[in-house]
Image (cartoon, rainbow, N blue to C red):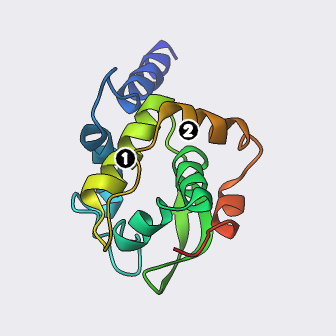
Amino acid sequence: MRFSLMLAAASIAAATPAPGATGQQIFSRCAACHLPTGAGVPGAYPPLRGDVRALARKADGRRYLVHVVIRGLSGPITVEGKPYRGTMPMQGGLDDEAVAAVLTYLTGTLATGSGPAPTPFTAAEVKRVREGAAAMSGADVARSQPRP
């Protein structure tokens, strides 16, 4: 029993990024499914490029992106015109600074698309969104997907 508690504590610590971790470092947990380039896996894991960048330029899109990270996603969504039906677990262990860092990296550096890079995400913005999302499920998040 003691070993299992130590193992659980170690996995929680491993899931929590080091203080001051960059968005790129935090994105390594996303890359397992979405690939290091953000290209995704056709039919399984959506790409994190053009639509994501476009969403980050709109208030409802920014809120949605934060929800996806902090609450996860379950159910059908459409990305770059293609349907995806799956589950993305909420990304536990990320504080507001880490969520802002990974979304800023994703939307400002990794995501491609036309137009200027979106405004960087801030910890204060993530905190505001998180405070209103405590009761949201992954299915609620999927249903709230705005159009890019």
Q: Which quarter of the picture shows residue 24? A: top left
Crowd around label 2: few <14 · some 14–19 · many ≥20 (10 Å): many
Q: Tell which of 89 and 65 is nearer to you.
A: 65
Residue 70's place in the image compared with 31, above or below, is: above
- At label 1, the amino acid type is Thr
State how far apart marks 2 and 1 are (Cα).
11 Å
Please tell me which residue is depicted at 40% across the width and 28% down the height of the picture.
Answer: 16
As helix, strand or loop, the secondary structure at mark 2 comes to: helix
The residue located at (44%, 39%) in the rendering is: 100
Furthest residue toward bottom: 81
Q: Amino acid at mark 2?
A: Val
In the image, 109: left or right of 8?
left
Residue 93 visible, this angle:
no
Q: Provide residue 76's location: percent of width, then percent of height.
A: 60, 75
- N-terminal of the pair, mark 2 or mark 1, is 1
Residue on which the image places disc 1: 104
Q: Residue furthest front?
A: 116
Quadrant of residue 86 in the image? bottom right
- Image mark for residue 1: none
Q: Residue at x 65, y 57 (%)?
A: 138
- Which residue was labeled with disc 2? 126
